[in-house]
Image (cartoon, rainbow, N blue to C red):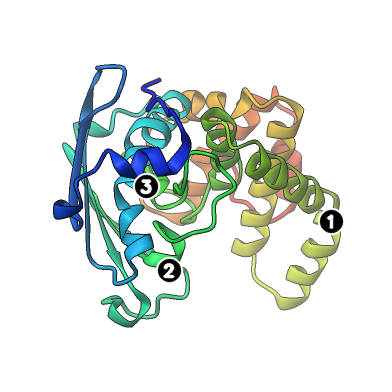
Amino acid sequence: MWKWLLSAGIAAMLATFPAAAADFFTVSACEDGGRLPVIFQIDCSNVADPHAKALCPVFLRNQACRVFPAYRQITGIRMEQFCPSLTYTIYDQDKWPEQGGEAGGLALRCAVHYMTQYSVGSTSSAPFGPYDTHEILHEYHEALGAIPYQHILFSVSQPEVMRLVGDTAAYDKAIARMKQEVSTFDQRSQMLAQRGGTIDQCVLAEVQVEEQLYLADRRNVYRFYQALGPARSNSQADREARFNRMYDKVSGGRVRAFLLAHGCAPF
């Protein structure tokens, strides 16, 4: 994994960047000398707060030299095959150009729009400063083709990145949340059943399976990506069947009945 070596914390990091170039930054290589296969860029011209703006290069290097290689290791996906560069554009909330904005971020093809408070201005427990595990995973998942729902594999991929980059506090919090979700599956499933419909039930069951398998063995998240076969069509049934075949394979054939019983398409 490429590493951005730290000396004396974020203050020292900030001191390495010239104040005159406060809006635009590019990272094409990391401190170990390895050239990145994907060029990372950031545009912070829409960020007003000086402290948040000063963290733009820190955030970008964390994305390029920590998060990007971690996801590469987990997924086996070579992003450079479809994105030679990845550009972050950061916006204060009053300048947000997208519709809605409740989530605070939007992944486009080879580009990410992010609100300041969820990116460079986020409160991070990591000693190396702010970083993001969410929108960049959408970029990686571009390579997966048709998927059953937008955030499949997010619940286990993001914590594994937190572990790999050394954010122990965030990882421990994610694992505690995961254990809580697994333990309350029956209650949540019953609530969904009362609302009707089968897609949400299948999504809930898929998340339950991936979280249970990850809690049993964190190496399973790597196996998920390795075992995922090619997409066959865009139908919802085929999307579900593709991922559920993968879950069943990684589980050793133990989850088929559970997934089918909770509204997933036959596979």
Kind of residue at disc 3: Phe
- Label 3 or label 2, whichever lies nearer to me, is 3
* Disc on the earlier residue, 1 or 2: 2
Relative to 259, 136 lies left or right: left
Question: Quick one: quadrant of the N terminus?
Answer: top left
Q: Which mark is residue 97?
A: none
Give the secondary structure at mark 2: loop
Instruction: Please say if 107 is above or below 100.
Output: above
| Residue under pointer 1 | 184
Residue 207 can be seen, yes or no: yes
Give the secondary structure at mark 3: helix
Kind of residue at disc 2: Gly
Relative to 190, 237 lies left or right: left
Of the pair 220 and 26, the residue shown nearer to us:
26
> How far across and how far down the image is residue 207, in percent?
65, 48
* Disc on the earlier residue, 3 or 2: 3
- Spatial separation of the CA atoms under disc 1 and disc 2: 28 Å
Task: Name the residue at 26% across, 77% down.
Answer: 97
* Disc on the earlier residue, 1 or 3: 3
| Residue under pointer 3 | 59
Instruction: Please say if 34 is above or below 116.
Output: above
- Label 1 or label 2, whichever lies nearer to me, is 2
User: Badge 1: how crowded within 10 Å, few (<14), some, or many (20+)?
Assistant: few
| Residue under pointer 2 | 104
Task: Name the residue at 50% across, 25% down.
Answer: 227
Residue 142 can be seen, yes or no: no
